Image: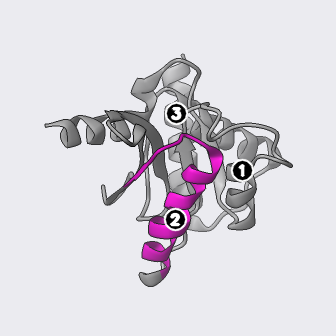
Amino acid sequence: QLGRFKDRLKALEEKMAQEKMILTEAQVQALEKKKNDDLVSGEIETAHPGYLGSQDTFYVGTLKGVGRVYQQTFVDTYSKVAFAKLYTSKTPITAADLLNDRVLPFFEEHELPMLRILTDRGTEYCGKADSHDYQLYLALNDIEHTKTKARSPQTNGICERFHKTVLQ
């Protein structure tokens, strides 16, 4: 039953794109719910570079004289272009720094807007929207923030795969 409903929503989305039709509020809400459900269940469909990026934090290890080392990772889910940067802390500031220093300049250089970012629910990405540095950074840059389902790292599998590749 659910599968058929999702198929109907996908067909509606395609028809809307082809015919430039206007949707009812209920149809818009159903499509938004489907997009969020697809994301949290790991079904990611992207239309172009910058449509959806996936960001994650990876614990690299401890280095003598440095301490703990973390890697902030960002992967564009359409093009698979990846960015990574090492930090000695896992904070909202370091999460935003990767976007500010590497990711957004790259997309701006190619005249592509970054529309949405998928993260887990780690403290470096989530907190009070009006005072959390990472969420404020996304809002300032008009980027939508989507969060994975709690305790399901496979939902952010594109970053997990990149981490595995880096380790090899």
Residue 7 at x, y percent in the picture: 49, 34
Q: From the viewer's perspective, is 42 left or right of 114?
A: left
Residue at 75% in and 56% down: 136
Q: From the viewer's perspective, is 30 left or right of 98?
A: right
Question: Tag 2's secondary structure?
Answer: helix
The residue singled out by tag 3 in the image is 38
Q: Main secondary structure of the magenta part?
A: helix
Q: Which mark is residue 135?
A: 1
Highlighted range, magenta = 85-108
> Hey, which quadrant is residue 59 in on the image?
top left
Question: Tag 1's secondary structure?
Answer: helix
State the CA–CA distance, disc 1 to disc 3: 22 Å
> Which sits in the foreground, 151 or 85?
85
State the CA–CA distance, disc 2 to disc 1: 34 Å
Whether residue 99 appears in magenta in the rendering, the answer is yes
Residue 91 at x, y percent in the picture: 61, 43
Q: How many marks?
A: 3
Q: Amino acid at mark 2?
A: Gln
What crowding class fits label 3: few (fewer than 14 Cα within 10 Å), some (14-19), or many (20 or more)? some
Q: Amino acid at mark 1?
A: Gln
Residue at 72% in and 44% down: 27
Select label 2 or label 3 by which is in front: 3
Query: Which of disc 3 and disc 1 is earlier in sequence?
Result: 3
> Hey, which quadrant is residue 129 in on the image?
top right
The residue singled out by tag 2 in the image is 18
Whether residue 51 appears in magenta in the rendering, the answer is no
> Which sits in the foreground, 93 or 74?
93
Residue at 39% in and 43% down: 66
What crowding class fits label 2: few (fewer than 14 Cα within 10 Å), some (14-19), or many (20 or more)? few
Question: Tag 3's secondary structure?
Answer: helix
